[in-house]
Image (tube, rainbow, N blue to C red):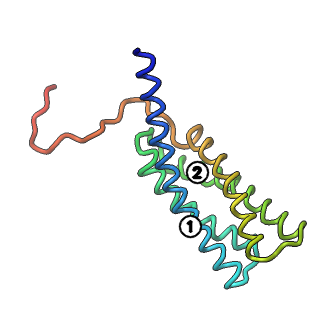
Amino acid sequence: MNFVGRLYERFASLVYELAKFGSIGAIAFLIDFGLLNLCNVVLDWGPLTSKVVATTVSTTFAYLGNRYWTFRHREQNGLGREYFLFFLLNGIALLFGMLAIGFTTYTLGLDDPLSFNIANIVGVGLGTLFRYWSYKKWVFLEATEPIPVELPEAGVKQDR
């Protein structure tokens, strides 16, 4: 019975973490989608330039949301290290989006807004799978010591 309890506990925490990651990702996707279409369709900056601009802004939001909400229970061993790795891995994930958009636009010759957005969604989906895996593996590491769920209330004496 103890094994089943541990299995449930581990699975429940994974589902909770995935839900938080998905929430941040959904908001970052809306930021990316809105800026991408603003830059490409309205400002006519071109599909790949627009993707880089939109991804840079949405990635900054995603870093802050994932660091301080989704993975806050994980080790915090240097903002500089995390930030560098986060943006490096997002740069790799950006390639998925740029390849999908570039292939659709320049190889298939489909440059209408619908085809452009479908290619973006495919690229974002592939990039998201890579990002979740890589964040857990290299950016937001498991805590080496238990992190308290709640801080003690002020004025309350604790046993030492």
Residue visible at 65% across and 47% down in the picture? 129
Left or right, 25 with respect to 122, comes to left
Circle on res. 139: none
The residue type indicated by label 1 comes to Leu
Is 139 situated above or below 160? Answer: below
Find residue 42 and report its horizontal and vertical position in percent. Answer: 67, 85
Left or right, 30 with respect to 149, comes to right
Residue visible at 36% across and 31% down in the picture? 146
The residue type indicated by label 2 comes to Phe
Find residue 138 and report its horizontal and vertical position in percent. Answer: 59, 40
**Foreground pick, 83 / 118:** 118
Residue visible at 87% across and 69% down in the picture? 106
Closer to viewer: mark 2 or mark 1:
1
Which quadrant holds residue 12?
Answer: top left
Left or right, 100 with respect to 43, comes to right
Quadrant housing the C terminus: top left
Is 13 situated above or below 131? Answer: above
Which quadrant holds residue 120?
Answer: bottom right
**Foreground pick, 24 / 134:** 24
**Foreground pick, 5 / 87:** 5
Residue visible at 56% across and 67% down in the picture? 30
Q: Is mark 2 on a helix, strand or loop?
A: helix
| Residue located beneath label 2 in the image | 86
Q: Is mark 1 on a helix, strand or loop?
A: helix
Q: How many labels does the image show?
A: 2
Mark 2–mark 1 distance (CA, rounded to whole Å):
19 Å
Find residue 68 and report its horizontal and vertical position in percent. Answer: 42, 51
| Residue located beneath label 1 in the image | 30
